[in-house]
């Protein structure tokens, strides 16, 4: 699986729950809320003032070791 800005957070977490730690690390603690389940990574990062490219790189690095 390769994550992009368009990846829906809920879809990612359904496939790889271990990715939650990356969202928690940047202050996204609302991963279970309906908005987070349907938001793309880019949308969530915009709301939280976080760099989507940096988050995606970390997640893809993590997924490449699986």
Image: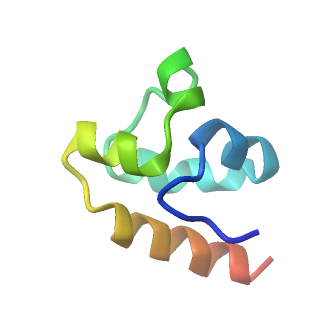
Residue 65: quadrant of the picture: bottom right
The image shows residue 61 at horizontal and vertical percentages of 59, 81
Q: Nearer the viewer, residue 24 or 15?
A: 15
Can you give x and y, in whole percent of width and height, for residue 4 in the image? 54, 64
25 left or right, relative to 64? left
Where residue 17 sits in the image (x, y, percent)? 72, 47
Q: Quadrant of the C terminus?
A: bottom right
Residue found at the very far left of the displayed protein = 49
User: Where 57 falls versus 44 (above or below)?
Assistant: below
How many discs mark residues in the rendered view?
Answer: 0
Q: Position of residue 23 (x, y in %)?
A: 45, 48
- In the rendered structure, the answer to whether residue 28 lies left or right of residue 11 reads left
- Say which quadrant the N terminus sits in: bottom right
At a point 32% along the width and 42% down the height, the residue shown is: 27
Judge by depth and name the residue closer to the eye, 29 or 53: 53
Residue located 38% across and 38% down the image? 28
Relative to residue 57, is residue 17 depicted above or below?
Answer: above
Residue lying farthest front? 6
Vertical order, 41 against 3 (above or below): above
Instruction: Tell me the colour scheme of the image.
Output: rainbow
Q: Residue at x 62, y 55 (%)?
A: 19
Residue at 70%, 73% (x, y): give it.
Answer: 63
Q: Is residue 35 left or right of residue 20?
A: left
Drawn side of residue 6 relative to residue 50, left or right: right
């Amino acid at each position: 699986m390769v994550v992009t800005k368009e990846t829906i957070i809920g879809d990612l977490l359904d496939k790889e729950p271990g990715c939650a730690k990356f969202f928690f690390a940047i202050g996204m603690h609302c991963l279970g809320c309906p908005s987070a389940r349907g938001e793309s990574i880019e949308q969530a990062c915009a709301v939280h003032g976080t760099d989507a490219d940096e988050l995606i790189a970390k997640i893809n690095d993590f997924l490449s070791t699986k």
